[in-house]
Image (spheres, rainbow, N blue to C red):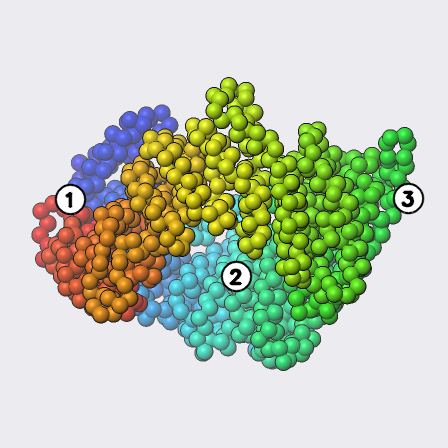
Amino acid sequence: MASEEASLRALESLMTEFFHTCTTNERKREIEELLNNFAQQTGAWRHCLFFLSNTRNEYVMMYSLTVFENLVNKMWIGVASQDKMEIRSCLPKLLLGQHKSVPYFIRNKLCKVIVDIGRQDWPMFYHDFFTNTLQLIQTPALAQLGLIMLKTTSEELACPREDLSVARKDELRKLLLEQVPTVLGLLTGILETYWDKHSVIASTPPPSPTSGESVELLGSLFQGSQYSKLLCQPMAALDTESQQLCCLVLECLAHLFSWIPLSTSITPTLLASIFHFARFGCDLHTKAKTGSFVSSNSSSNGQLNPGSMPPTSNGGGQNGHQSQGSKVDRARLGLLAMTCVNELVSKNCVPMDFEEYLLRMFQQTFFLLQRLTRENNAHTVKSRLQELDESYLEKFTDFLRLFVSVHLRRIESSPQFPIVEFLALLFKYTFNQPTHEGYFACLDIWSVFLDFLTTKIKSRLADRDSVLNRYKDALVLLLREVLNRIQFRYNQAQLEELDDETLDDDKQTEWQKYLRQSLEVVAKVMELLPSHAFSTLFPVLQENLDVYLGLQQFIVTTGTSRRLNITAENDCRRLHCSLRDLSSLLQAVGRLAEHFIGEVFAARFSDALAVVERLVEVTCYGSQTNLYDLETAVPSVLKPDLADVHAQALAALQAYSHWLAQFYSEVHSQNQSQFINLITSAIDASSPLITAKVPEKLMLSACHLMVSITSTVRPVFLVTLPAVQNIFNLITTENRTRRLTQEAHMLVCRALSNMLLLPWPNLPESEQQWQTRSSNHASLLAALTREYRILRGTVNITPRQPALDGMKAVIQQTLPVLRDIVDSISGESTKSRQICYQSLQESVQVSLSLFPVFIQQPDVTDEMLAFFLTLFQALRVQMGVAFTGQIIHTFLSMFTREQLAASILQEGSAGCRVVQKFLKILQVVVQEPGQAFKPFLPSILSLCMEQVYPVVAERSSPDVKAEMFELLYQILHQNWRYFFKTSVLTSVQKGAAEDTMENEAQFTAAMQAFGQSFLQPDIHIFKQNLSYLESLNSKHKLYHRKLFRTSMLFHFINVLLQVLLHKSHDLLQEEITLAIYNMASVDFDAFYSAFMPEFLSGCQGVDTSQRTVLARNFKLEQDLPSFTQSVQRLVNDLRYYRLCNSSLPTGTIKL
């Protein structure tokens, strides 16, 4: 006894020293080693039991419990049955004796250790484990402890970790499910009891915010509902202890609901009780920071707050004079109750007998929604929501989202569920949200609803009108309110708060996200109510346009400066708001462009024409008056506003390019004057903006509009317009001072090239004027590449650094433009590509001759290979076999092994990107059908396997690896007969039993490379390569080929099983298991009779009897679901056996 006492004192001083700030890391390691050695000793648990009973040191308690936890979870199988019995008896006694005196985290840890024992031994050796917990819950003084035990049991037994066999996991789940009705009954009883005990029962309730809920308020939501009166009762006034006990009950329910199936065990009474408590979240006295509560007083800790008020008498809490802790507890009750509701609602699989309960749940929740959105003299809806707990509101919004996305289709047609009233409540809830995040979340719910409605209408076209009429009022209100919300005129205070500078992960600012989400809702309403949406939006747009178009009268010119004569602060503010709104409304009009084309073109023609004419007028006005260039009273605000309106008008007009194209095709044989005027004006509006003096945002909008007109609309007369001629001159004359930014220059060149290359719509081939256009295109490219082509003459001279820098600059300016021009016609007709290549031919040859000069300069080589890659993808047919061969030959000879290795080793560098692009070019080559490029196959394979693969095999090099394996896959897939010569006839005659194999060594090396990649940690390469093997199997029967079947199949299955066992690529479990199934299914008999015994006999860390059990449990099934289950069971149980065996004390004899 004295020695144990001494050991305890020594342990206490060690622990205190370990956590002392002055202790060095070296000393901490020494102490850690001492403690670990002690824990490994047989019988250490006895000392720990003594320590737990006799210390007040929290560190010692925690250490002792960790020893027990380790013993139970890792070494239990080797503990003597007598010792197990003693532990099972002592720890619960310890818990009962000390649960009030020890800190909550010690008590919770002790509960977990007891539950861990139950996980191993219940019911066979620990038959009273669960009944003890139920007894605790039913004993008032110990109910809190019982609930903590119950919650821990649900967490640890229902979804256990992998340290149990599958059979035991199944057994535990079954045992728990048997107990569920009893448990739910008990928990329902507690909630009911506490509610009834603390409810205010009085014949005439005092006037208070809560008693103002009259039954008629509920409208048709609750006609005939037996719960309407129940829910209209005043709120129960719980004392602090009762609140915390109810919090624990709700936490238990939330966890139980996360795994138990929906069934009649979840009774109407239980649901009603949960909803009673959900009302606490609607209580205006609950606003508090939940963080402080969780840290000091979390109900999951079950700690009573010693500083809280003594329990009040019934009704004592009604007047709001509660302690802060009590208020927070009330908020938490509401939050936990909604968590329970959401757990139930998130289940998509609803049994028939539960549908009625579901309906009842929704009725009860919408009572709460009505309560949340109720206005009275004291509070507006928004101020009510602002005062509520933020987390509760989030949960409530989650509920609404789940309801609309998962269950609306079930409930919507029910006569007992008034969907229109629900939408009215949702509308109030949405547009009174206190935060932007809350508003976004509600807009998402509306988007889901609108998608549901659109799908429903498409599937029921016959009664489309009746469905729409039912919802029309709601949609009209929604549209109007969302449009108001994006306008500064109605919502300036909120919109000014939005950040319009910082970009998020999606490369948009908070303001852009707000606008985009709002416009998506507008567009979805437009799809359902097109004419109404248009008649709502267009007048608002007109109103703001009138302000913008009226600015001309305020422009004052003095000498060379032009000034906007609006200076009063109020006028400037109003102008700022109007311009911001005009910008947003122009985006809205652009977003709706898709609803005027296709089948509805004729029906909505006049509306669309009105929009396009107005947009053309605005863009012309903006370009003529140069509003972006005015001096203003508030330049930092109004100048960007004016430029933004102009840019958005151009962007909106660009959105209508598909409508203009359809207009062109409809009127091409009739009077075209209207169309010609629109296009001419649009070009006249954008061409003056294509100059370096204009703000970049505005210039790029003009360039994009030009590109869309030339690529989508393609008017035949475009090239003759004076404005277009001016742009030709700007681009083709050498004037460095007028040079555009790289992006704008590229866009304009693309537009000019498109104009000459793309076929004109509605005209026969004979009228396309290809000859004239071809010579014009040649002139254009000759002008664009003038400096570049001169470089050819400098190839043989070894240039000095300044000259080299100049050459690099020319290359890096010219090639992106050429690449972009080629890329833009890659999907076009042969004629367009032919002309393009003729114009480019000399530049391509120059590039090839410059390539060796710059091979040591990766940034230039990168640019050149990007150009060649685009050429190969778009123009390889036009380049012809001979020249393409010359290019490939040049590349293959330039990229020596040393060159490749040096580039690959600099991960993420330009050199690495060069190799990637080179491999991409080879991918294009090996995919080319026909025999033209087949002679290159051996050297490409050799480069891949002998030069690139050895360098990347042992390194991560993810980017190069991904491209190399794709090249390998394309070689195998597109050139299968290079390896397998089997003809259709022989495969029919011989039943594909024999393969005529060629280039076997290269095929084997490729397969080994794939196999090797499965042993490495890179999950992306693993996934990619697994999909390549599966693809080769589905297209070419890879797994059935004799060579693969006899010498590789089992190796691959073995590697994939080992990956599952090591859990290194857990995200790909399904894909790996499917691949194993596809490989095994080649010959199930061989898999079961040869592979499995061999695999199990080679498994380390398991004994013979365990191997027999593993083999017996792997069912000889041949369908995928059963096979998958067997693989999962094998992996789980094998890991479990290894864990058990590694934890046994040395010398243990296993029976």
Is the residue marked by circle 1 packed among few (<14), some (14-19), or many (20+) residues within 10 Å?
few
Task: Kindly report which numbered mark, 2 or 1, lies closer to the viewer in this rendering.
Answer: 2
- Secondary structure found at label 2: helix
Q: Position of residue 1061 (x, y in %)?
A: 25, 52
Q: Label 3 to label 1, Cα distance in Å?
A: 96 Å
Residue at the (80%, 59%) spot, across then down: 674
The kind of residue on which mark 1 rests is Thr
Please name the residue shown 61% across and 40% down the image.
781
Quadrant in the rendering for residue 1086: bottom left
Label drawn at residue 553: 3
Q: Which residue is mark 2?
A: 338
**Residue appearing at x 57%, y 59% in the figure:** 397
Q: Nearer the viewer, residue 431 or 1115?
A: 1115
In the picture, measured across the screen, residue 1116 lies left or right of residue 910, that is left
How many angstroms separate mark 3 from mark 2 (CA)? 59 Å
The amino acid sitting under disc 3 is: Gln
Identify the secondary structure beneath mark 1: loop
Badge 3 element: helix
Q: In x, y percent, where is residue 165?
A: 24, 59
The reply to whether discs 3 and 1 touch (Cβ–Cβ < 8 Å) is: no
Residue 739 seen by the camera: yes
- In this rendering, the label closer to the viewer, 3 or 2: 3
Q: Amino acid at mark 2?
A: Met
Residue 476 visible in the current orientation = no
Nearer to us: label 3 or label 1? 3
Quadrant in which the C terminus appears: bottom left
- Mark 2 burial class by Cα count in 10 Å: few <14, some 14-19, many 20+: many
Q: Position of residue 291 (x, y in %)?
A: 52, 46
Whole-number angstrom distance, CA of label 2 to CA of label 1: 48 Å
Q: Is residue 547 above or below residue 995?
A: above
Tell me the residue that label 1 is attached to: 42
